[in-house]
Amino acid sequence: MEDLLPSGLLEVCLLVGAPRERVRALLQGTQRKPRSLDPEVLSVFVPPFISRDDVQVLHGGNNLNKSKRRSFRKKKERPKMENVKSVNGEQKAPDTEDVTVPKDIDLVALPQLCFPGGLYVTSESKEDHIHFLVFTDVCGNRTYGVVAQHYQPMQDGWISWSRQAHRESAQTGKVPVCFVPFAVCVISRYPYFNALKDCLSSLLVHLRPFKDLDVEEHIKEFAAKLFLIPSPPPGPLHLVFNMKPLQIIIPSREDPDSPIIDLDLHLPLLCFKPEQVLQIMTCILTEQRIVFFSSDWALLTLVAECFMLYLHPLQWQHTFVPILSRQMLDFVMAPTSFLMGCHIDHFDEVSTEAEDLILINIDNGDISHSKMAEEELEIPDVPAQAAETFIKRVESLQLHYDLELCHLRASTDLVELQTRRRAWQQKLNMEVQQTTLQLIVNIFKEVKDHLNYEHRVFNSEEFLKTRAIRDQPFYKKVLETYMFHSFLKARLNRKMDAFARLELSIQSEEDRFDLVFHTPRRLTMEKMASKRLTPEQKISRRMVMSLPNLQDIKLPEGPTRNSSLRRTGTGVVAVKMPSKSISTFKIPEIHFPLMFQCVHSYYTDFFNHLSKAINTSPPENSALLARYFYLRGLISLMQGKLLNALSDFQNLEKTDLRIFPTDLVRKIVETMPPSECLQADRKPELKRLISRVMEKQREVLKIDDHVKNFELPKTHMQLDDFVKRIQESGIVRDIDTIHRLFDALTVGQQKQIDPETFRDFYNYWKETEAEAQEVNLPPAVIEHLDKNECVYKLSCSVKTNCGVGKIALTQKRLFLLTEGGCPGYVQIAAFRDIEDVKSTTVAFLLLRIPTLRIKTLSKKAVFEANLKTECDLWYLIVKEMWAGKKMADDHKDPQYIQQALTNVLLMDAVVGALQSSKSIYAASKLSYFDRMKNEVPMMVPKTTSETLKHKINPSAGETFPQAIDVLLYTPGHLDPSERLGNAHPKLWCALNEGRVVVFDASTWSIQQHCFRMGRSKLTCMVMVEQSQVWIGSQDSIIYIINTHSMSCNKQLNDHRSDVTDIIVESRNGTPSEAYSSSLDGTVIAWNVSTLKVNRVFQLPCQNLTSIKLQNDQLWCCTRSCILVMSTHEFQLQMKIEHHLEDVCACFLGFQLFPERDEMWAFYSGSSDLYIWNTKDLSSTPEKIHLQDCSEITCMIRVKNQLWVGSSGKLQGKSKGKIYVVSAERRSVEKELVGHAAAVRALCSAEDRYVLSGSGKEEGKIAIWKAG
């Protein structure tokens, strides 16, 4: 069973020093100077220290020496079995099982690291000293060591750990005492530096009264105690235990992806100035060969570890040896990147012997290069804006604890002193973490703009071009490192780590809209104007997007508060995240002597304490409950109670899935004896747990981890290869648009594109993009434009009837940038005001000059511009933008104008790349909206136009539209613990393969781009309470989303078939019970607070598709009938069977109008609604036929209306139609044609708006005004 258990606090404990015989031999000399010995491992204490076999010892007395040994003594370089001794020093038969040492512990090198400066026998006592070690195996896994050195007096050949012996010998005038150093080394899988330091400090206090042979037993008990202490799971629970005279705290990591932090993170900030900290971080980020130096061995490891934590989530991939003993100095000659640490005494030797090293002196804060470097190393500066923000934040930190103590009373209690200091350190650590994480985000946040997720491509060349000139040397070096490559993998895998969470929290509205539209990058007027503002003016201005908005969906009234988000004058975001509350759990005392009975008693107490904590914790504190269940599962496993352990781990699915130990549970299942397997099979919840865990093992998905840098093609491309290359380049992702681009670039030739044409097109596109970034309009022009407008194209200087200047194109208008002494602004036309566009010629002397004429509705005068060779291109551009704007206005879909923008920029690039007589004809292939306007008049029916408010596209940026399976609107609320943005109403959209996109319903910008709930189709969503959204899936799981963290930490697994519907019952305005149904006819009633099953109902028939709750009655729709059951006894009260005898139809859905005693339903494949009188089910239902409807797909009730989604036909084309039916008049009030595909989902927004989602042919959401 020991092989199954995760590591405790201790992996192995060692006593290291010089054997007594060698010390005696050394003392026979007469020299008084310090005398050196080679350190050796004297004893190794390896868990487990007690086993069930030791129960037999209980009957033979309490003599600990009779129990099985788990330690050995060593006298030579490697521990051999013949050297194993018992505690009384007698020879003992070798027992290989008793002395098994973890294979990655090197007992030859370890003594040198325990005494890195050498082992010296001295004539004077020295203070106890503690330092820290880090070991890395070939797989990159790290193990940590904490070493306590203690000087023992030796007299008459005997070593005593008591200082009293030294004082007595001095009084009696005996032979002078010498002092021999010994070290106790604790090795752990976890970096609990402070905790293990405190433990060893307590041990040294306890060892003082003992003599040589008694010490080993005491160390063994110490090691056994640490072995019995579990490591806490990630989350808000720290463990506490007594190691008298100190109280030890074992901190947990913040989440499964975060590192354990049990050291003082501000130490480097005390040793170095902020600018030097940035230099060192740059050295690490650029993977230099780095050596730290200090006169304090402890500082070497702590400072190096701090820098590793500063870079999180980036991880150092190379050799990491923070302490080198004097025998290991040749390690610094390694040719590859490394980070090592040496004593300051070796500084000159290392700096002269090795080349190209970065030498960092912790003691005086100096950073230098090794002297033998042929060329001086150039360490680039951290990007200026990110560095400036970091320095300001560091300078604002309170780094000195003494300043914190000034206003506090003096404490007389050691535990209180400890607690006060820890609280201060924890707060400071969090501030340092936030500061360094913010630095990393500010450096790398724009990497995502140059990633292609589908093809896993990073366009490093374009990323570098967008960096400031002074910052490019930094990025050029960093982009070549292993660290950055691993960082890219995590971004492409959409890993939601600390970087992603902070990046999401500081996203601006402009960033969120970019997710919706993927517009080519240009400077907005806001950003252009900000270049001219002072830092103070920049802070006072706020970016506002002017896309259509539902202005009358407002936030509920709530308390006002300051936002936690602020912008610095440099434009780099500075964020202060709220601190999270931490709880502690006191581990029961471990009693000695070390026998099975004592250990059994400890586990029993531990289990009981955890059970009490579980029973007294409120259900809403699920995060804390999850940690208690996890720990209790571990304790049950320690006790050999496998079924109890599985039951506790099973509870994690309903409290916090993130800490579910999948591998551990699988090992438990694989090693369970047959008798316990049979017992598990008799318990349905355990049987399901085992089935899921073992199934996951068979379904392990191979994660694609490759990252490709974008390169221009070198061979001819057919259509499919061209599509892939264009998507990789980041120019455009939509496949239909790329197909049109392919036709444009292959006009008059074979249907393939040569590398030269692709290169010319790509370079022209990127050059145009770069030039547009440099456009700098004068303030007098900027004030005429909206804040979110961008200049996408400028003509050459031309003569017009409004003067000489350049024609400028934005997403909203054309204007003339007049030339002269003071450039001015002349409005040409807003695209929605254009009445006509013509390309003609005018006579000038003997020439005919191509001229563009634009007629607007608001002006009588026609604008004329002599565009000469540019005229034909501008004619295409203006017509396309005009048609796109008309489409956008008619369909209330701003994406049309963004698509038109992309089309005209592609036209421009095609003309620029081809440079031939056919280039204009080629560019016309991209006039998509203009051609649509001319070929098929896109008239939107008046009723549709008046009712439709807005359209959004959750599939923006995807290669294909995605079908919308489910929609859910959740109203806004203001929780003081959350950011202000979380108070906004949200629209949840379920796409294919379990993906969910969340929109901010106050601005229709994307709040959460995409997170995944399994890989099956999602079938239903409901807001159970303000902090929870439940999502049902065809994989039979109900996923529970925390609306604050926007993550899925819980799931319900009690259904055995597709989850089809979820409804919530509220009493006194509070959710009390939730009902979920599955296709196999099962209905489960859930306690919303505890997530426990209240009742399980099984219908007499299957194919259950939806449920409704009305007056303690559960209405269940199956394909063959609708059943009405009582919610308490679950007895059948009514049955409604379909009446279409001549048609093979089945029920698909229904709605209730209880105040009218009516039920409305529809059948599969039918275009009719049927209305039953619930008081007289024997009567024939009323029928309402829906004109031009092919099939009803969904429906919802909104006040006294029924909104019915369908697929239908319009002008011979498939359309998604919505029928608004009056329940009172039994008639269709409106027919709404807003989708180019069948309507698949409907939801209501507070009965004021209705939202509809369409199938995969279109994949858009329409927002309609209700009423």
Image (spheres, helix red, strand yellow):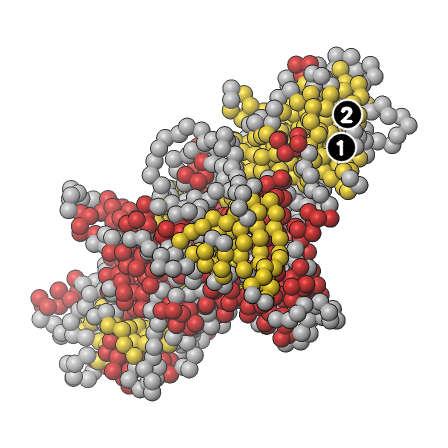
Q: Is residue 1098 left or right of residue 811?
A: right
Query: Could you classify mark 2 by the number of other residues whose Cα lies within 10 Å: few (under 14), some (14-19), or many (20 or more)?
Result: some
Q: Tell me what residue is drawn at x 52 percent, y 34 percent.
A: 550
Q: Earlier in the sequence, mark 1 or mark 2?
A: 2
Asked if 164 appears above or below 1196 in the picture, the reply is: below
Label count reads 2
Q: Is residue 87 left or right of residue 97?
A: left
Q: Closer to the camera, 987 or 1261?
A: 1261
State the residue position of label 2. 1169
Toward which corner of the image does residue 1097 lie, by quadrant?
top right
Q: Quadrant for the C terminus, please.
A: top right
Give the x, y percent position of residue 358. Answer: 32, 76
Q: Closer to the camera, 315 or 74?
A: 315
CB atoms of marks 1 and 2 within 8 Å: yes
- Label for residue 1192? 1
Q: Tell me what residue is drawn at x 65 percent, y 25 percent.
A: 1197
Amino acid type at mark 2: Leu
Q: Tell me what residue is drawn at x 77 percent, y 25 percent.
A: 1169
Q: Closer to the camera, 245 or 998?
A: 998
Asked if 440 appears above or below 688 in the picture, the reply is: below
Give the x, y percent position of residue 952. Answer: 59, 42
Q: Is residue 670 visible?
A: no
Give the x, y percent position of residue 466. Answer: 45, 64
Q: Report the Cα–Cα distance between label 1 and label 2.
A: 9 Å
Amino acid type at mark 1: Ile
Toward which corner of the image does residue 31 lie, by quadrant?
bottom left
